[in-house]
Image (cartoon, rainbow, N blue to C red):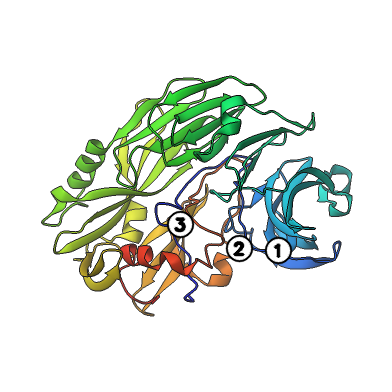
Amino acid sequence: MKKGLWLMLIACFIMGTLSGCGGKSAVFSGSGAVSGGGVSDLSATAPPVQEKAGTFCNNWYVYYQDGVELVERPLAGGTGRRTAVAYLSYVCYADNDWVYYVKENINDDRYQIWRAPVIQSEGWRLRVDREELVLEDKQGFKEQPGGVWCDGKYIVYISDETYKYREYDIQEKRYNDTGRLEKCKEISNVAICGKNVLISAWDDGLQQKRLGSDEIQQIHKEHPYYITATCTDLFWADGFQEIKDIWRYPVDGQAQCLITVQEIRKLLKKEGYSRCALCDSHKYLELGMFVRAHRLYIQIHMRHDKKPCCSHIVVISKDLDADGVLQVEKELAQCLNPLEDIGKEVWKMGRNGGRDVTYMNRGLCVMMTEDTCLMYLEDKEKKRNRWACYDFKTGGLRFVSEKDASGSLMYSDRYHTLYNLRLKREILDMNATVYNYINDVLPNNYDF
């Protein structure tokens, strides 16, 4: 890895959410003027990776932005193609009729959302040459976590300059301004969840709004900083970084506490993952929630700052049925945190200054689809940190190259799979400002 490293953001940047057909909100990776229309073939490869937050699919193709090119690859594998799009920033939604994308810095820094048709009679091909403007906002779209949410009927975003909640009806071609929300400057996160919008605001807790309606109701008094959504459910962790409880809210039901921190602590102690001398003083931090196979996965970072300092990462999960059992994902834990390891003590310069830390983990999960989990792990033989891919179908784990990690490991499927979006820009190009946080979770100094 280069020193321009990826990884999860410090708490002020951390947010997880998802909506759309297997995809999620956007990535800002820079754009510039390009003469549009140029198309080049891509060689046949494995299905494309969901390596960028702005990757979406319909029933036939997966779409994502690469530089100033819009890439479309068939889900079944085979030849894809790239189309140059002037001022392209990121894809924000796709279905069987349209692909929506954001353009930035157009004539005096204007920000626009465009869409291009998917033509069934041409083999479900995307025709960027027939693109049309959907909306424009000179104030831009807030990059938190992606800026724009779309479901093909509505576009929801937070204004970059005013922090206002904006909701645009695509068919009616008008904004649905909503009183207090329109004036609110404390919205921290938004998720489209079926026909509803879930809004997390510092001053109003968690609120639910029906798309196209002015009706708003509060569903949780506390402000959840981290939220993860499917088309039917919203999940969040109470507590700023340190977990209190995990909550679930079905949009047609009532909010309910799904997992308590006491249950998590009891499980990890029972399974032998809290085994250091100071385990009773561990803080439990949430480093990403994922949903796949009707299970909620939670990546737990156990740590304490008392000497000797300790760091330990493990993934737990719970079936979303009413009587679902909370369990450790032992296959993932074996990849991240082999129990036979006795721990590795490393001197680190972290957020709290220099210290000796005993690591029980060798890396962490970064994102997840129905089929695969992308990890960043220590390779002891090569003495460096590397991308690795865990296959849920075979149970196999293999290290992969950066090229594979950024182009051919995962794809955004049609079943609204969730993955961790605690990332800024691209996962292979993380800003240096988060180096201290990386130090807290990796058991070596290879990347520094």
Q: Residue at x 79, y 65 (%)?
A: 33
Marks 3, 1: nearer the viewer: 1
Secondary element type, mark 3: strand
Q: Residues under labels 3 and 1: Cα distance?
A: 25 Å
**Which residue is tagged 3?**
366
The amino acid type found where label 1 is placed reads Ser
Q: Image quadrant for the C terminus?
A: bottom left
3 and 1 marks in contact (CB < 8 Å): no
Q: Residue at x 20, y 40 (%)?
A: 266
Earlier-in-chain disc, 2 versus 1:
1
Picture quadrant of residue 18: top right
The amino acid type found where label 2 is placed reads Ser
Q: Nearer the viewer, residue 177 or 16?
A: 177
Marks 2, 1: nearer the viewer: 1
User: Looking at the rendered structure, which numbered label has been put on residue 31?
Assistant: 1
Q: Residues within 10 Å of mark 1 (few under 14, many from 20)?
A: some
Secondary element type, mark 2: loop
**Which residue is tagged 2?**
408
Secondary element type, mark 1: loop
